[in-house]
Amino acid sequence: MSVQRDRVALRRLQWRAAYNRHLATAGLVLMLVLAGWRTLDPPARVVIRERQGAGLDLPLSAHAARFAEAFVSFSSEDPEARERALAAFDGGRGAAGEGYLPPQTGSRRVLASQVVQASVVPQGTRFTIGLDTVPQGRIYLAVTATRDASGALRIVGFPAVVGGPLTAGVLPDPGGRDVDARDVRDVVTRALRNYLAGRVQDLPADLTGEAVISVPTRPLRLERISELRWEQGVSDSVLATVVAAEPDGPQMSLTYELALTRTSERWFVAAIHTHPTGR
C-alpha cells in the first residue's frame, strides 16, 4: 500500500491559522457589540392587549339603556304598562318579559339611567347600566345588545342584575413643587377669577391668542386659591386648588389645571382644564 503525501507550505498553514483566529475574534467582537447595543437600545416589545371595552356605539348603548329602564319598571295599578314598554324590543312577541311575575302592590320607576361599563362578548356588547329608581334606589343591570346583518339594534337574551364597578378612595392630584413665582400666581388668580365669574370681556387679557375657553354656565365667586403647584411631569402647567362659591349657593373646593406660556413680557394662560372643542 502506498501512502500519498501532500506538501503544504508552512507560510500557508500559518496564514490559515491566523485567518481562522481573526475570523473568530471578529465574530466575538460583533456579538459583544450587538449585545451592548441591545442593552442600551433594546428592541421594542410587541405588546398584544386584549380588547377591554366596546367601541363607541351610542345608538346601541342607548337602546340597551332604554331596555333596562323598561325591564325594571312596574306599576301594580297598570301591570300592562311594562309589557307595552318591552314590546318595542322584541316586535311585540312578549319574549322580553317572559318569566316576570309582577308584585300585587307598589311600583318602581326610573329617574335616570347611565351606561357605566361596556365590554365585547361573543354575543355582542354587554353594557352595565346604573339605574336610579324610586323607591328602591340604585340598581345595576347588565344588558347584552348587538346589531344584526341589516344593522338593526337587537337585545340578546335576558339581562342580569349585577353589582356596579369597583370603586376606591379619591386619589390626590399628582402635583409637584409649590409655585413660588409671584407673577405666575398673579396671572393664575386673575384668570381663574374672571373665568369662574364668566367675565368674557376681561378674560382674554390673560390668554394666549390660540386659547379656547368656555366659561361655566353658572358664575362662581373665587374666594381664594388654597394651593398652587406645578404639575408633576408636565412643563409650564399648574394645578390650582381653589375655594369658590355659587351666588347664594354652596361653597366648594375645586381643582383646575392651567397650561401656561411664557413670553418675553410675562406669563399667559393657554388653556383652563378642558378643551371645549373636544380635541
Image: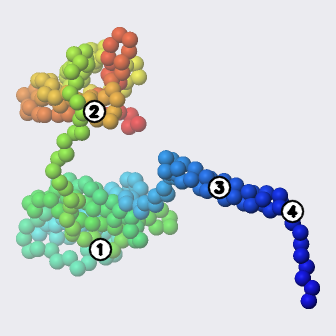
Q: CA distance from mark 2 to mark 4?
A: 77 Å
Q: Nearer the viewer, residue 269 or 198?
A: 269
Which residue was labeled with disc 2? 231
Q: Residue at x 69, y 58 (%)?
A: 21
Q: Secondary structure at mark 2?
A: strand
Q: Nearer the viewer, mark 1 or mark 2?
A: 2
Q: CA distance from mark 1 to mark 3?
A: 71 Å
Q: Quadrant of residue 87?
A: bottom left
Q: Secondary structure at mark 4?
A: loop
Q: Secondary structure at mark 3?
A: helix
In the rendered structure, find residue 25 and report the number of the disc placed on it. Answer: 3
Q: Residue at x 36, y 18 (%)?
A: 262
Amino acid type at image mark 3: Thr
Which residue was labeled with disc 1? 158
Q: Nearer the viewer, residue 73 or 9?
A: 9
Q: Residue at x 11, y 23 (%)?
A: 223
Amino acid type at image mark 1: Phe
| Residue 84 appears in view | no
Q: Nearer the viewer, mark 4 or mark 3?
A: 4
Which residue was labeled with disc 4? 9
Instruction: Report the quarter where the C terminus lies.
Output: top left
Q: CA distance from mark 1 to mark 4?
A: 91 Å
Q: Earlier in the sequence, mark 2 or mark 3?
A: 3
Q: Earlier in the sequence, mark 1 or mark 2?
A: 1
Residue 2, image x, y percentages: 92, 85
Left/right placement of residue 68 relative to residue 33 reads left
| Residue 147 appears in view | yes
